[in-house]
Image (spheres, rainbow, N blue to C red):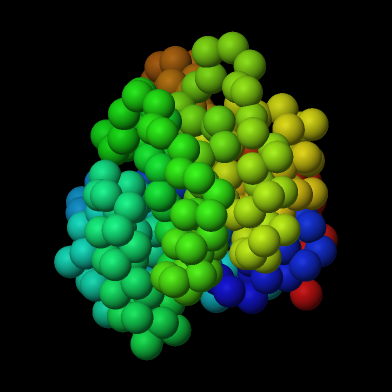
Amino acid sequence: MQSILSDAFAHRYGVGAFNVVDGLTMEAVLSAAGETRSPVIVQVSVKTVKQMGARLLRLMFEELASRVAAPAALHLDHCPDRSLIAACVEAGWDSVLFDASALSYEDNLAQTREVVALAHAHGVAVEGELESIRGVEDGMGSEAESPVVPLDSALRFLRETGIDSFAPAIGTAHGLYQGEPRINFERVSEIVAAEPVPLVVHGGTGLRDEALRELIARGAVKVNISTQLKITMADAYRTYLNERPSEYDPMKLFAAVKGEVRAMTAAYMHRLGSAGRAN
Ligand code: 13P
């Protein structure tokens, strides 16, 4: 994870972090990475990890990633539960997002520091978060706007926790945008100028190319995509079955869905600029 993000940050290209929900979507995302020669982050939400188990997901990831000639990392998305973080660290995941945004500033800082100590002792990267990102991601979060932490406090959080990447509130939101998001590009530049750490764009679905380009150029290089993957997957199942009411071969159905998710992912890899960066 560290080498994927540091290369993207140094050369200012975006790396997609795609929230997968099962083996089929994990395979589709990884095969898009192989096809486009793109570094990739395979990201999993807490709900999915609780359903499938940290170890099973890790084993699936290792096998599927080994078939692909591109750097890939397995990352746990928004997790407030430290025992689940410990389970993922134990199972050999590459990175975790400790989401302590519901805690006070001081408690968040103290607990994030402890999570970093545990994770780094196992070579696992940590993404940190101070303000909750607006919108709901797999049952986590809320539509309420969270107050933005002043710059000096955000910088102190970065320095004192030692996190590897940071997800600040910059006006993006999980889910589908109602209207044009008002993105705080300046905040990205201010943070990165003072502390050169890769920033994370939550709510990547629905952002226009110009916004993505601007965010990436300023240092927000990890771009999370979840809603679009779910839409592509569900639409592919629906379309395939509706168009073929007497088709019952699961392998044909899965191949069709995988192809759609792979194509959507590959298109993002070109848009973000990670295509061709696998070396
Ligand atoms: P979207 O659901 O808007 O793509 O956001 C994904 C995300 O930020 C996951 O943490």
Query: Looking at the figure, which quarter contains the C terminus?
Result: bottom right
- Seen as rendered, the residue at the extreme left is 83
Quarter where residue 123 is shown: bottom left
Work out whether residue 227 or residue 222 is closer to the camera in this orientation and state it. Answer: 222
Residue 31 visible: no
Query: Looking at the figure, which quarter contains the N terminus?
Result: bottom right
- What residue appears at the point 35 percent right and 23 percent down from the top-left corner? 143
Residue 182 visible: yes
Quarter where residue 30 is shown: bottom right
- What residue appears at the point 55 percent right and 49 percent down from the top-left corner? 151
Work out whether residue 32 or residue 104 is closer to the camera in this orientation and state it. Answer: 104
Q: Residue 136 in the image: x percent, y percent?
A: 35, 30
Image: 1 above or below 266: below
Q: Residue 15 in the image: x percent, y percent?
A: 66, 55
Left or right placement of residue 146 versus residue 224 in this view = left
Q: Residue 126 in the image: x percent, y percent?
A: 44, 68
Work out whether residue 267 or residue 3 is closer to the camera in this orientation and state it. Answer: 3
Q: Residue 242 in the image: x percent, y percent?
A: 44, 15
